[in-house]
Image (cartoon, coloured by chain):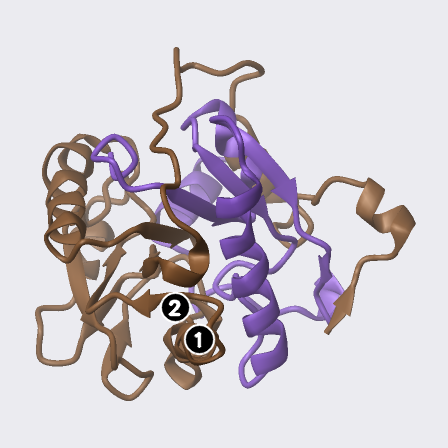
Chain colours: A purple, B brown
């Protein structure tokens, strides 16, 4: 909608495969945990580098659906990375009950 | 901070690396094998980044303290829908002046450092360095979880956000789902 209004957009996205559901004009894929797309608390260097890389896609994208996989590695192993809310979200709790 | 090695760079980003098996199964079931859309909208970039006014959007349910927060009780009462409204955030927003309401992530990180999801301080640095033209006066948030019905977000919030961006003559919008 923002793009349709004439404003170019880049989406910094973890689940970049949603491209089949919502066609995003320019995508910067990032392998970061949910809740911290730009980097961890206090890690200004990574936040700045990710922001710079995502903004850079405005200059490299040439056609709609452009996808770039950003070269950042999260500093923790997924097993050590805590991103979940304190309680399961209502929909997850509901789906798990149905299992 | 570490960048991926040459071998790692050749790989695609793993969208499920942090998701866990159950969430991966739930979310990937909703992704078709082929695009369901006919075309992707496209607005060409008309000026260099160094002369562009940039706005940020987050799906972390962010609101300025003092403004009505995103409604979590709506989702608790009916888990298949999320709050479809939107909020405007000031360019000087910090983790002290913003609250994050989102039932699907630990919002504690954002509450300690807004820049993990809405890097306004980082954006100011890039402007000061001459890499970006200007920070927009306003930035935006929606609730990322919409459930089974995105129609109100699409019909009401998205056009309002686009209109607000246009009124501030924003050149570029960087969106970051959480």
Helix, strand or loop status at disc 2: loop
Report if the CB atoms under discs 1 and 2 are less than 8 Å apart.
Answer: yes
- Chain to which the residue tagged by mark 1 belongs: B
Whether residue B30 is visible here, answered yes or no, is no
Answer left or right for A26 relative to A39: left
**x 64%, y 50%: residue:** B20
Q: From the top left corner, tell me how far across and down residue B13 is, in percent.
A: 70, 45
Q: Secondary structure at mark 1?
A: helix
Q: Quadrant of residue B72?
A: bottom left
Q: Is residue B155 left or right of residue B94?
A: left
Image position, residue B144 (x, y; %):
33, 49
Task: Give the residue at the far right of this rendering.
Answer: B7
Locate the N terminus of chain B by quadrant. bottom right
Where residue B27 appears, as percent x and y from the top left, is 51, 35
Give the residue at x 40% y 80%: B121
Answer yes or no: is residue B115 visible. Answer: yes
Quadrant holding the C terminus of chain B: bottom left
Q: Nearer the viewer, residue A88 or B113?
A: B113
Residue B21 image label? none
Of residue A66 and residue A83, the one placed in the foreground of this image is A66
- For disc 2, the marked residue is B118
Residue behind mark 1: B115
Residue A80 quadrant: bottom right
């Amino acid at each position: 909608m923002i793009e349709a209004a004439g404003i170019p957009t880049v989406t910094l996205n973890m689940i970049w495969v949603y491209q089949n559901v919502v066609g995003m004009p320019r995508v910067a894929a990032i392998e970061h945990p949910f809740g911290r797309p730009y980097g961890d608390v206090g890690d200004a260097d990574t936040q700045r580098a990710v922001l710079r890389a995502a903004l850079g896609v405005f200059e490299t994208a040439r056609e709609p659906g452009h996808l770039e996989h950003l070269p950042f590695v999260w500093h923790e192993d997924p097993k050590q990375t805590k991103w979940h809310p304190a309680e399961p979200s209502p929909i997850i709790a509901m789906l798990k009950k149905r299992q | 901070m570490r960048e991926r090695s040459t071998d790692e760079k050749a790989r695609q980003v793993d969208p499920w690396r942090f998701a866990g098996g159950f969430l991966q199964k739930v979310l990937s079931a909703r992704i078709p094998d082929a695009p369901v859309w006919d075309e992707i909208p496209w607005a060409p970039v008309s000026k260099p980044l160094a002369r562009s006014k940039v706005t940020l959007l987050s799906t972390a349910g962010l609101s300025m303290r003092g403004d009505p927060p995103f409604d979590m009780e709506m989702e608790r009462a009916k888990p298949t829908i999320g709050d479809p409204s939107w909020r405007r955030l000031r360019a000087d927003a910090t983790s002290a002046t913003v609250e994050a309401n989102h039932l699907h992530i630990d919002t504690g990180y954002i509450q300690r450092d807004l820049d993990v999801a809405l890097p306004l301080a980082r954006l100011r640095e890039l402007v000061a360095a001459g890499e970006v033209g200007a920070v927009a006066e306003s930035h935006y948030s929606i609730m990322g979880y919409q459930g089974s019905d995105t129609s109100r977000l699409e019909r009401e919030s998205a056009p309002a956000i686009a209109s607000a961006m246009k009124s501030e003559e924003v050149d570029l919008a960087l969106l970051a789902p959480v």
